[in-house]
């Protein structure tokens, strides 16, 4: 299987390593670089040297063709076992329970170490010691020792220095490589050879995966919710895993996962859905997002009592009222000399003027007007008012109709019965799910790849609903929170996960690190940062309300006509207009208020230069007043 070559590590335990010690014939070229751990026993004592001489002599006689005649741990333990029985019997004929009790009392130093039997659970056994060797050539090199409860040491004596690791030892050799060679037995990633992580290069959801290419600097940056979750997960692994992201520019996620099977990528990170069909190519971590499929439909109007103001925006209502008062004021000023009912006290004239402003179209028709100037203003304002009222009626009717349609498809059954067209996100599995499981007709489902495309399809009445995975649905509702809602149950399908090769030993560690990211609140923080913004964007201008831009030209025409009529009237009256002190004070006050408002608006638009501009603006306002 080529598992004794470069990038692999083998560590053998006592049963195998002890055979290497006592029988060098089992060492072959395929075992080069193996690290072995075998039981330690002292070979320096007088008893061992004597036994070794006798062992060699007898072994050579019985095995003349075997050159390795050194006694190993098994020979030493066998000798100690026989010596234990000899000490227990001591020339007597003991047997059974009596012999067992005698054996349990044996306490001596044998070839393999101290021989003593533990009779009670609370008694401590002698410290276990192991010899660590490295097979090189036809023999092995002794690296050091490990003692239970003490750690690693280069020697075994009273003054030995023990450490928790063996990095300061003499360099060992792995198969075809030195000590610092990386091993595929656990991970293969190094700074020189990092893991290759495939990332969707053309994801339609920038909040999850965003790849930015710098063609001038020949570099690529990666960001988004999925990328940050993976980075936080890697930080919590108990080992270092160097990696690099690589953008996969094919739009098919099945092809992206397939690259793991083809060994072009070591893993895949992104908004990849966990599917049973993809398990043939790779394995997945536990989902790092909520699982399921949600149905999204347009939201019903929240406040039916105020539906009458929705056809126009707030600024449109305010400007309409201002222009109405302005036109009424001009007509009142021109007609007041011809109508005694328009004169009187200041309070009476103000009430008459406001009443005239909003009632001109119904109570003071052209036949009752005495001036052509007021008639000219009235005709233009009548045309503009007619256009505004008809547009208001049409838009209000449209909104009320759409409002009823919004609640017409609250569930899958209603959509199927009405033969409605629905949308779905990227992924062929969703198409199969809608057709095979939910029973939609193939011609009634349409694919969209971005959140903006879903919203535009709703606006154009192309679809009545859309099916999205829970993470994408939460992102869509966060962006268009006042226009759409989720209805019905959540259909169980796989969530988003990270893909790894089948049988990868990293998968359990990645899952554990991913759970830590979730349990310590980092996953929620990232979700709030990328998917659930704290405030809902103001979409009032997006709900089909008509704004000033729709009527700007008409307002300019009617305001200009009324202003021209006022100017002609003032010049025709000449000096006699100077007698209306109250009227002029009112007009000057309005002009001063208008000028101040413009100054305030100018300062707010240039807030970054407010410190340098405060004094000039204040002096300008004082001079104007």
Image: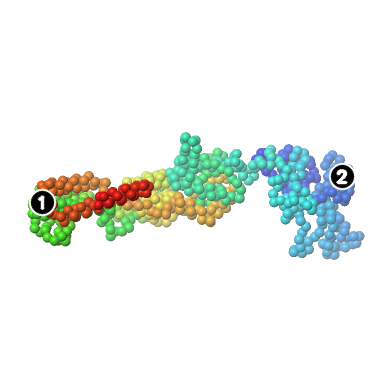
* Residue denoted by label 1: 576
Residue 204: mark in rendering: none
Q: In this view, does 216 lie above or below 310?
A: above
Q: Which of 331 and 441 is in front in this view?
A: 331
Query: Along the horizontal axis of the image, is 447 left or right of 358?
Result: right
Q: Nearer the viewer, residue 584 or 391?
A: 584
Residue count near mark 2 (Cα–Cα under 10 Å), binned few <14, some 14–19, many ≥20: some
Residue count near mark 1 (Cα–Cα under 10 Å), binned few <14, some 14–19, many ≥20: few
Residue occupying image coordinates x 71% and y 42%: 171
Residue 502 point in image, percent of width and height: 57, 45
Query: Along the horizontal axis of the image, is 301 left or right of 162?
Result: left
Q: Do the residues labelled 1 and 2 touch (CB within 8 Å)?
A: no
Label 2: element kind: helix
Q: Quadrant of the N terminus?
A: top right
**Quarter of image, res 83:** bottom right
Label 1: element kind: helix
Q: In this view, does 264 lie above or below 371?
A: above
Residue occupying image coordinates x 32% and y 46%: 460
Residue occupying image coordinates x 73% and y 43%: 170
Residue 237 point in image, percent of width and height: 59, 50
**Quarter of image, res 95:** bottom right
Q: Which of the two labelled residues, at mark 1 and mark 2, occupies the earlier sequence position?
A: 2
Q: Which of 247 and 96 is in front in this view?
A: 247
Q: Which marked residue is nearer to the observer: mark 1 or mark 2?
A: 1
Residue occupying image coordinates x 58% and y 43%: 242
> Taking the image as drawn, is residue 214 in sight?
yes
* Residue denoted by label 2: 56
């Amino acid at each position: 299987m080529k598992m004794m070559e470069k990038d692999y590590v083998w560590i053998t335990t006592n049963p195998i390593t002890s055979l290497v010690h006592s029988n060098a014939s089992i060492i072959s070229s395929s075992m080069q670089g193996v690290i072995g751990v075998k039981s330690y026993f002292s070979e320096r004592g007088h008893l061992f040297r004597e036994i070794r001489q006798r062992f060699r002599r007898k072994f050579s006689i019985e095995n003349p063709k075997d050159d390795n005649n050194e006694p190993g741990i098994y020979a030493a333990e066998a000798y100690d076992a026989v010596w234990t029985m000899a000490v227990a019997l001591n020339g007597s004929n003991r047997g059974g329970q009596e012999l067992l009790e005698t054996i349990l009392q044996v306490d001596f130093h044998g070839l393999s170490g101290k021989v003593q039997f533990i009779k009670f659970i609370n008694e401590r056994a002698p410290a276990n010691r192991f010899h660590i060797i490295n097979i090189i050539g036809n023999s092995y090199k002794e690296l050091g020792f490990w003692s239970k409860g003490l750690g690693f040491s280069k020697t075994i004596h009273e003054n030995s220095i023990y450490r928790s690791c063996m990095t300061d030892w003499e360099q060992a050799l792995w198969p075809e490589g030195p000590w610092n060679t990386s091993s595929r037995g656990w991970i293969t990633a190094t700074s020189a050879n990092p893991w290759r992580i495939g990332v969707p290069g053309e994801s339609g959801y920038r909040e999850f995966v965003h790849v930015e290419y710098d063609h001038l600097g020949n570099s690529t940056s990666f960001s988004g919710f999925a990328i940050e979750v993976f980075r936080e997960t890697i930080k919590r692994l108990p080992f270092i895993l160097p990696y690099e992201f690589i953008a996969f520019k094919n739009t098919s996620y099945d092809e992206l996962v397939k690259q793991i099977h083809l060994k072009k990528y070591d893993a895949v990170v992104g908004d990849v859905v966990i599917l049973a069909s993809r398990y043939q190519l790779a394995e997945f971590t536990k989902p790092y997002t909520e699982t399921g499929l949600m149905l999204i439909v347009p939201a019903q109007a929240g406040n039916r009592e105020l539906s009458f103001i929705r056809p126009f925006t707030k600024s449109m209502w305010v400007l309409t009222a201002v222009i109405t008062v302005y036109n009424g004021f001009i007509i009142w000023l021109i007609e007041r000399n011809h109508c005694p009912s328009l004169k009187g006290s200041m309070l009476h004239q103000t009430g008459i003027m406001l009443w005239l402003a909003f009632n001109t179209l119904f109570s003071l028709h052209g036949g009752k007007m005495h001036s052509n100037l007021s008639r000219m203003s009235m005709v233009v304002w009548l045309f503009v008012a007619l256009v505004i009222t008809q547009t208001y009626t049409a838009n209000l009717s449209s909104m009320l109709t759409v409002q009823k349609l919004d609640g017409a498809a609250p569930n899958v059954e209603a959509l199927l019965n009405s033969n409605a067209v629905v949308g779905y996100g990227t992924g062929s599995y969703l198409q199969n799910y809608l057709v095979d499981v939910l029973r939609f007709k193939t011609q009634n489902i349409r694919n969209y790849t971005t959140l903006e495309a879903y919203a535009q399809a709703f606006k154009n009445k192309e679809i009545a609903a859309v099916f999205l995975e829970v993470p994408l649905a939460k992102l869509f509702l966060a962006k268009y929170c006042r226009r759409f809602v989720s209805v019905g149950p959540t259909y169980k399908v796989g969530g988003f996960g990270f893909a790894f090769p089948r049988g990868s030993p990293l998968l359990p560690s990645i899952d554990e690190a991913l759970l830590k990211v979730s349990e310590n609140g980092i996953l929620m923080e990232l979700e709030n940062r990328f998917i659930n913004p704290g405030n809902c964007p103001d979409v009032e201008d997006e709900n089909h309300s008509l704004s000033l831009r729709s009527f700007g030209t008409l307002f300019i025409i009617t305001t200009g006509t009324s202003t021209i009529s006022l100017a002609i009237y003032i010049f025709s009256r000449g000096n006699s207009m100077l007698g209306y002190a109250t009227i002029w004070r009112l007009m000057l006050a309005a002009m001063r208020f208008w000028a101040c408002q413009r100054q305030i608006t100018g300062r707010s638009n240039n807030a970054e230069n407010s410190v340098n501009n405060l004094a000039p603006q204040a002096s300008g306002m004082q001079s104007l007043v």
